[in-house]
Amino acid sequence: MAEPTNTPMPTAPPTPRSTSPAPAHTRLGSTASSTLSPPKPIGITTSVPLPVPGGPLGSKPVVLHIGDPVKYNPETYTEFTREFDVVRPSAEERQRPAFMQALREKRWGDFSAIFRPFWGTGGEMGHWDEELISLLPESVRVFASAGTGFDWADTKLLGERDIVYCNGGLAAAEAVSDFAVAMIISTFRALPYCITSTTTPSSFQACHASATALSHNLRGRVLGLVGLGNIGQQIALKCSLAFGMDVGYYDIERKPLTLEHKLHARYVDSLENLMRESDCVVLCTPAGAGQLINKESLAWFKPGARFVNVARGSLVDEEALADALDENRLSNVALDVHANEPNVHPRLLALAGSRTLLTCHNAGGTAETHVGFEELAMRNIMAVLAGGQAITPVNTHWLKSKVVT
């Protein structure tokens, strides 16, 4: 999922994925909930709402809004501003030195929440590390942000401060999983070669004659998912139902059997076993666990297997990946994310017309995802400050007492 271009990307301590389940597989406009905006009755409210401090603007709790104004959900924002005083620092105030000074001065009072509805703005202050988090007032209970990844924020430290961090993974799951399916297809059907061979009549004819031997149907092939969060769950459902793939997954925790049956996915007890049996491995897990795809783990792949990354470039040793391609241990790869964005590894780029499909961190980038990010961030804040349960928390096991989880 794309992250803010103005946010540095050093990895924070390892953090778990969102604990929220995948939304129902429904069409937009149906009566069931969709990925674009959670239903209005959200969370599990407590019998007595938790007391929430107000700020200098009045008796209502204060929300610090970092980034551009709300654009897509005016009705929800009207409800939001009825419940909270919303303070939005200027772009100049969001630059790191100015932002830190404003926090020291308590310029925005004892605010209760941080609201970042877009990934393209609101990251001007840089990495949310100890230097920045230590300046937050004790009143802060929730930080709700756009974006699926959260390696720009130390969610462990936020949790130790009793601040629940909520990401936008639920809103992005539809878009990222669609993109992942396209990438999976590309690795089985040699699409980079087929697409780039249209440039001349001779290359067209050569591709028409030779691509068949490189191409395979998806049905019955083993798809190995590294991570079964919101995105992984939708990939599993789409690939099992639409293409008849045999879906296996590895995760830090096994999902309930009822969910596995619904997704037509089976649990594999180790990353090594998953890779050894998969015809295509898809990385769809949060960053923070170091490099999952490296020289050692690439040796576990079946000869001629395929690899897709819609997670984070930092999870992959790209030099080792290029070696595996050059040595024909992997047949094709598709990468939406890269270790040194916006720079693409030169050896992988050299194979872009034949065996690598390379995109520009586009998987989550749809208009609908933007709408969902904005809505979901507001709903998370409204739920937590009402004394209820966050919709998409990622750091609940580090929380102590302030937030009901």
Image (spheres, helix red, strand yellow):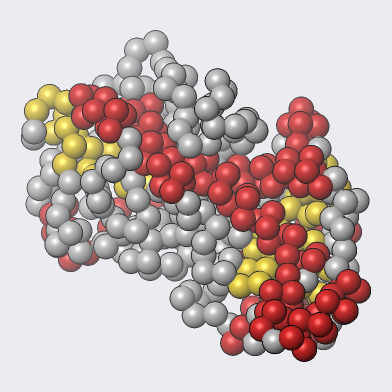
Image height check: is 369 above or below 285? above
Image height check: is 368 above or below 224? above
Image coordinates of residue 274 in percent, x first then y, are 82, 56
| Image point (80%, 61%), residue name | 280
Q: Quadrant of residue 218?
A: bottom right
Image coordinates of residue 4 in percent, x first then y, are 38, 61
Kindly give the residue lying farthest to the front in the view shown.
201
Image height check: is 10 above or below 164? below
| Image point (63%, 68%), residue name | 335
Q: Quadrant of residue 317?
A: bottom right
Relative horizontal placement of residue 355, taking residue 381 as reference (left or right): right
Image coordinates of residue 386 in percent, x first then y, are 33, 22
Relative horizontal placement of residue 142, taking residue 177 as reference (left or right): left
**Residue 346 in view (yes/no):** yes
Kindly give the residue lying farthest to the top in the view shown.
47
| Image point (46%, 46%), residue name | 369
| Image point (76%, 31%), residue name | 262
Relative horizontal placement of residue 369, taking residue 213 as reference (left or right): left
Q: Nearer the viewer, residue 243 or 160?
A: 243
How many discs mark residues in the rendered view?
0
Image coordinates of residue 329 in percent, x first then y, are 84, 78
**Residue 164 in view (yes/no):** no
